[in-house]
Image (cartoon, rainbow, N blue to C red):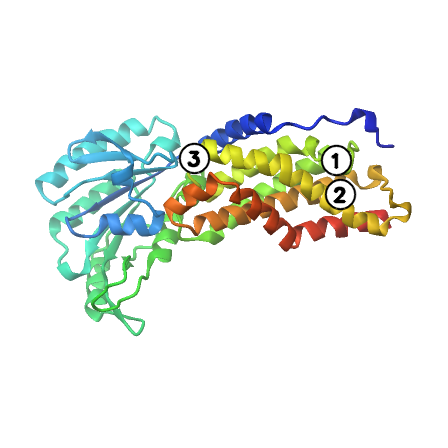
Amino acid sequence: MASDSSAKVPDLDQAQVETMFEQKLAEAFAALGTFNLAVFGKTGVGKSTLVNAIFGRDVARTGVGQSVTKGLIYYRHPDGFLGLYDSEGFETGTSGNAILEGLRKLVSDHGQRAIAERIHAIWYLVRWADRRFEQAQEGFVRALHNLGLPVMIVMTQVPTRDGQVHPEALEFATYIESLGLPLAPDGRVVITNALVDAFTSSPVFGLQKLLDDTYGVVPVAAERALTAAQVLDLGRKKKAVAGIINQAVALAAGIGATPIPFADAALLVPNQVTMIARITAAYGLPPSKTRALAIAGSVVLTGGATMAGRYAVTSLLKFVPGGAIAGSAISATVASALTKAVGMAWARVCEYAMGLTPKRRDAFLASSEVTEKFVGFLKAGNSTSGIVKVAKRALT
């Protein structure tokens, strides 16, 4: 089937793409759902430090708080995909009993609601230096389990020396485990230190184990939100993004099956808009900056994506006799490769943004530097050369 140049799709202007991107970005974040974590522990146990280390944000400080029961406040972070149930100044005894009563009703009510509104995991924090695990604490943990909630006991602020955990902390953890508590996911206490100790120089450790255990108990429907929310494991984000790119590539192949002008990326833009929005959400970049991201995305897609196509065409012309390209033979192949190149380059932009401080990240996402980085990653990586290679093979 020959290519019909008269059927060329008109270029989308930046305003149109910006509006489309803003809508798709909102849809992508909404599709993540919410990961809800409950954190309990005595005053000074290091709740905020641990949450900040895993999620890179102080949910209780930046989120919108709502009292859900006596002694328990639910904070929904502005990003939407992370919620925290926090018992400020939690103590055992009467306070614990009051919280349990409220939780019983909460769990009963939430059992009839969507998964995104339920409690998905509980961290019960114990400071190693306390060296005591009281009967009331044991009863509280068992009561949480009886409510059907997965509970992890996390020992905090544990010092190490030369890679060895303090022996008294190990002894304390062994004692807690000997009580036969129904701890998720494997009956073990998770030993952690979430902040480098300036005096002893004890390093951060145990956080990846805590995150892995948390993934082990959350429902599948909450995994995408957890992946977006956590900042510790970039590999999980990359895996999610690889799936997003592969889906977009498959769709691009279908679009390219109906031949389109080789240097014109306009027909691919709607698919790429959705892909870039989903990648942005998977990395957990702030949706509160939707406007800035929409502007940046529209620039990339109306300028960068078309640039990528023309960059590939320019390279291909060197291999084609007479400098003409038979688009019908390679449309699907090139559409797929181009979409993959755009997705991989945008993923690198997101990874770069994640490595910045929050203030610097906001400035970056609102600037033309986003497009500059995208084009730079596109040219420097193997993605665009891949377009040339697969298209060259299709021509020979």
Image marks 1 and 3: residues in contact by CB distance under 8 Å: no
| Residue 155, position as x, y percentages in the image | 24, 57
At horizontal 55% and vertical 29% (from top left) the residue drawn is 18
| Residue 173, position as x, y percentages in the image | 23, 61
Of pointers 3 and 2, the one earlier in the residue sequence: 3
Separation of marks 3 and 2 at Cα, in angstroms: 35 Å
Q: Between tags 3 and 2, which lies in front?
A: 3
Looking at the picture, tell me which residue is in the foreground, 167 or 137: 167
| Residue 243, position as x, y percentages in the image | 57, 44
Image marks 1 and 2: residues in contact by CB distance under 8 Å: yes
Left or right for 116, reference 334:
left
Q: Amino acid at mark 3?
A: Lys
Of pointers 1 and 3, the one earlier in the residue sequence: 1
- Crowd class of label 2 (few under 14; some 14 to 19; many from 20; radius 10 Å): many
Looking at the picture, tell me which residue is in the foreground, 109 or 357: 357
At horizontal 34% and vertical 26% (from top left) the residue drawn is 112
Q: Is residue 380 above or below residue 249?
A: below
Q: Between tags 1 and 3, which lies in front?
A: 3
- Crowd class of label 3 (few under 14; some 14 to 19; many from 20; radius 10 Å): few
Q: Which residue is mark 3?
A: 289
Q: Which residue is mark 1?
A: 256
Separation of marks 1 and 3 at Cα, in angstroms: 33 Å
What secondary structure is found at the residue carrying circle 3? Answer: helix
What secondary structure is found at the residue carrying circle 1? Answer: helix
